[in-house]
Image (spheres, rainbow, N blue to C red):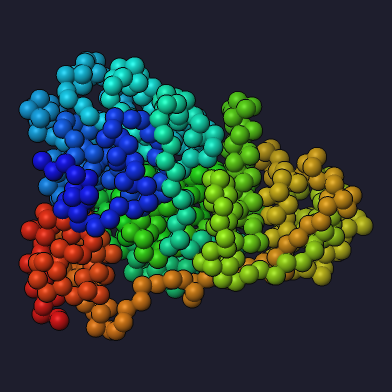
Amino acid sequence: MLREPHQILQDVFGYPEFRGNQEAVIHHVMQGRDALVLMPTGGGKSLCYQIPALAMDGLTVVISPLIALMQNQVETLNELGITAAAYNSGTTPEHRAQIHQDLKEKRLKLLYLAPERFSAPGFIEFLKTLHINLFAIDEAHCISQWGHDFRPEYLKLNKLHDLFPHIPRLALTATADQQTEKDIIDRLNLGYGTVFRASFDRPNIQYRITAKQNGVRQLVDFIQSEHPNDSGIIYCMSRKKTESIAEKLKEKGFDALPYHAGLSPELREKHQQAFIKSEKVIMVATIAFGMGIDKPDVRFVAHLDLPKNLEAYYQETGRAGRDGLPATAWLAFGTQDIFKVRNLMNLNQPQDQLQAERHKFNALLSYCEALDCRRIHLLSYFGEQSEACGNCDNCLSPPETEDTTEAAQQALSVIYRTGQLFGVTHLIEVLLGNETDKIKEFDHDKLAVFGVGKDKSRQQWQALFRQLVSKDFVAQDTDGYGGLSLNENCRSLLRGEEKFFSRKQPYLKQSGGKDRKQVQFKSDADQSLFENLRALRGRLAKAADIPPYIIFHDKTLLELVFQRPQNLQQLSRIPGIGKNKQEKYGEVFLELLTNEG
């Protein structure tokens, strides 16, 4: 049994060095101490418990919220020659019996469990019979009611401290603001542990926001122009919309599949496996999809509806580019999207929870409407300072701003003078001075504000109303008619006590695509070799019925292209190729490299 973490990292996982504070976390838990690890998606959290599991005697128990996450990690570990198993509601009685036997005979190094297992009769007693060296609690933000993905069953994990007082607990998450972090520590009783914080920055992701005009058309244009042959995830709020968008993408020639809780478990599993095992499938999903899916080659994440907060947005966009290669986070939103989320928040919420959610949603809107670097806003939310990134839409195409205080006052005035009863479309018609039947019916052509906004386009007024809503100056009635009304905090703007700035030209076109960082090949021959290596990997994966990335990540294939190893010794120096993979796949990849050398 290997005992030295560096040796395990190199021989088993094929990496020469630890990243960030991985090594510090590993040594900390191997000394029997508790910890909370805050590390971005793709930052290597799993190695923080997988390497101690191999370095120490006994069993590491990993608590995970999703079956898909467990299956994914177990497949990856088994491919590396590591004995691991998943125990959840999808485990057959025969497989459960085999797992019990393997545990009794100490054949497993890692056991993945759903949190519900801890309530099963006799299960805790069974765990107490095993030689457990570590509890790893993955997606630890699920324990917080302030987090974006609260799971009540995670609350049961507070018992671990009392039931197994001498076994270290390692809580890990990629998303936690200060309140969520405090909640994790308190609920899991990690007060005497250490908090390890890595940077939340994902420099390979280009963040882009666009004003929604025709969301589907804009989405199709984005994919066709930038990611025509890539795997991606598209998030929508409703089940119906996921199916509609998937169908429209299919009509455009894309391999797109829907995913939501209304589909049968069998169909969800089928679609998920198709996504994981393909390099081109696009998943159109509700937020129920994606947590813990360790698919490294997702090249884009798109949002056609707003998330509830920046934590959810960060986690969802973080599913792009886990391999560190260039990826895009694209979001289109409009005024109605803001109203949808705010109206949902108002349903059956305790007041303190409602206030917290409103605050978090307003932070998301501030990020969306930002006129400077988006990464600065995003990282600031998680308590991290940053300089302008040079790789978001605002950095690549800095927006020109103008003082639109007078126009904002006109917009607020038209809401008030029409009785705070009408929606955006009608209000804009009044401002533009269009004599529609509805305007004549209510004598709105007689108002002083009729036609005062002719100097601006319909799109400019739409953008301005959206910003007024984003800044919470304006609310929408929930009586089914969608009329806008004024909030108390608009008074200072109406009085001229504060200024209102907007983009000079609301951005309607895609921005940043031509400037998106891409992998640079030195020659056409290099690119051809990369595609041939991907094809070989795909054939091997299909034969083994595993995802291609479990064999090698794209990043490993790129290193094969750039370094062109000619023998097993040279191959062993390529990051991501440990001894087990070298033995299984080394010769066949070397043959291709030699033939094309």
Tag count in the figure? 0
At which x and y percent is residue 441? 83, 53
The residue lying at 46 percent from left, 71 percent from top is 516
Q: In the drawing, does residue 496 fall left or right of residue 456?
A: right
At which x and y percent is residue 157? 36, 24
Q: Nearer the viewer, residue 546 or 1?
A: 1
Residue 493: tell me if it is visible.
Answer: yes
Residue 102 found in image quarter: top left
At which x and y percent is residue 28? 32, 36
Image quadrant in which the N terminus is located: top left
Residue 29 found in image quarter: top left
Residue 592: tell me if it is visible.
Answer: no
The residue lying at 47 percent from left, 68 percent from top is 222
Q: Above or below — where is 95 with respect to 221? A: above
Residue 480 found in image quarter: top right
At which x and y percent is residue 279? 28, 62
The residue lying at 13 percent from left, 40 percent from top is 83
Image quadrant in which the C terminus is located: bottom left
Q: In the drawing, does residue 530 fall left or right of residue 508?
A: left
Q: Above or below — where is 442 with respect to 358? A: below
The residue lying at 43 percent from left, 62 percent from top is 204
